[in-house]
Image (tube, rainbow, N blue to C red):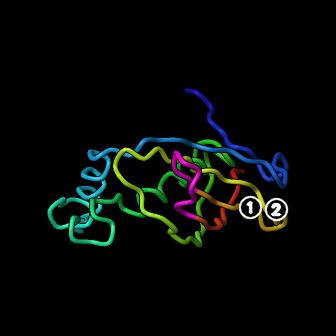
Amino acid sequence: MEDIRGFTIDQLEVGQEASFTKTVTEADCYNYAGVTGDFNPAHINEEYAKNTMFKTRIAHGMLTAGFISAVLGTKLPGPGTIYLGQDMKFTKPVQFGDTITAKVTIDELIVEKNRVILKTVCTNQNGDIVLDGKATVLAPK
């Protein structure tokens, strides 16, 4: 069996960063709705969405936030990371077909508690910030 481990606290440095990029599809939003039960018509009903401020369906904000989780759990700190908290603000809508890049950057290391504070940002293909925040995680042991 392959040994998959992320970076331990002593292998991390302030300023270290990693990212994940994905184009959001209609299928992604329908799958997310099915898994979570969030069938808000702003995400799944185009006729309804035409009458919203966005004039079309938008992706679930938490789907976008999930891209941050992907970076934390697979890249930095990586496998074995435990997500403790996330403070975030959704700053622009994500539409079907947008290519989103989730980037995390280490802001602070609290070695004695094995905690890592990271800046978390998601941008679209135009470089617009669609999500901005901070995450707190436990680094892998």
Residue 130 lies in the magenta stretch:
yes
- Please tell me which residue lies in front, 86 or 64: 64
- The circle on residue 75 is none
Label 2 environment density (alpha carbons within 10 Å; few <14, some 14–19, many ≥20) = some
* Residue located 21% across and 65% down the image: 50
1 or 110: nearer the viewer: 110
Q: CA distance from mark 1 to mark 2?
A: 5 Å
The type of residue carrying mark 2 is Leu
Q: Position of residue 53 (x, y in %)?
A: 32, 72
Name the side, left or right, on which 14 lies relative to 31: right
Residue at left offset 56%, top offset 70%: 88
Asked if residue 96 is positioned above or below residue 51 in the image, the reply reads above
Residue 140 pos. (x, y %): 69, 51
Image quadrant in which you'd find residue 19 = top right
Q: Are marks 1 and 2 in contact (CB under 8 Å)?
A: yes
Task: Residue lying at the far top in this picture: please name it.
Answer: 1
Report crowding for label 1: few under 14, some 14 to 19, many 20 or more residues within 10 A (C-alpha): many
Q: Which residue is mark 1?
A: 116
Magenta range: 122-131
Identify the residue at image location x=68%, y=43%.
Answer: 6
Give me the residue at 64% from left, 42% from top. Answer: 75
Q: Element at badge 1?
A: strand
Q: Which residue is mark 2?
A: 109
